[in-house]
Amino acid sequence: MPPRRRSASGYRGVRQCSNGGFYAEIRSGDLRLSLGTYDTAHEAARAFDAAAWRLGRPRLQMNFPDVRTLQQALDLAPPPRLNSAQDRAEHTALQRRLLVAQEDERVMAEWRRRHPEDVAYEQEYWERRREEDTRRRREERLDRRRRKALACAQADLVNAGGSSFFTEEDERWFDIWLSTSDDTDDDGGADEWSD
């Protein structure tokens, strides 16, 4: 039988998990021996080799053929993960939060089913809020344009040799650098200082 192809992790018997960790296991026929989850693929491969040595596998089926003895493999393997009381408490708290979130979603779905008029009112409310926010942003942008145009006109007047009704310390001079860009989103995602 040809040797097994190495996984995408680059090591035999090691797979990458969706959470970013690495899962190691040894397969032999119908037997699957789980070796746990590790932070790096290298750690998982070392754990695989230690288990392979214990099961009497040939060195060609190991990830690190330079390891010559079982003791060397055990010395290089990561220590077994211990589940402390703190680990169990964190897991319990996360499970509790998940249950609360699922129950909350179930109750909200039931509430929406029973009170469609409140759902419609809420949707209307948020639509009104979006329209008011869009109107307010447009008015603010128009005000910035007017202030900038006034400051630019005063600067042009002074540059042409005339006099401005702005004093030298007038803060309205800073309006020359206001952003009046039309490419800002109406959803409020634009930075006020960008051009």
Image: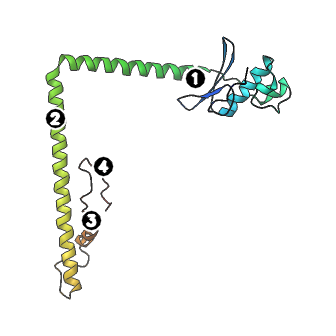
Which of pointers 4 and 2 lies earlier in the amino acid sequence? 2
Query: Residue under circle 2?
Result: 125
Determine the residue positioned at 24% across, 68% down. 175
- Give how far apart the Cα atoms at labels 1 and 2 are: 44 Å
Residue 69 horizontal/vertical position (percent)? 86, 26
Nearer the observer: mark 4 or 2; the answer is: 4
Residue 6 vertical placement versus 113 (above, below): below
Helix, strand or loop at label 4? It is loop
Which of pointers 3 and 1 lies earlier in the amino acid sequence? 1
Query: Residue under circle 4?
Result: 189
Mark seen at residue 178: 3
Determine the residue positioned at 69% across, 12% down. 29
Helix, strand or loop at label 1? It is helix
Determine the residue positioned at 23% across, 18% down. 111
For label 2, count other residues whose C-alpha is less than 10 Å away and answer few (under 14), some (14-19) or many (20+).
few
Residue 189 horizontal/vertical position (percent)? 30, 49
Q: Amino acid at mark 1?
A: Asp
Query: Residue under circle 1?
Result: 87
- Give how far apart the Cα atoms at labels 4 and 2 are: 21 Å
- Give how far apart the Cα atoms at labels 2 and 3 are: 32 Å
Helix, strand or loop at label 2? It is helix
Q: Amino acid at mark 2?
A: Tyr
Residue 42 falls left or right of residue 90: right
Q: Amino acid at mark 3?
A: Leu
Determine the residue positioned at 56% across, 28% down. 17
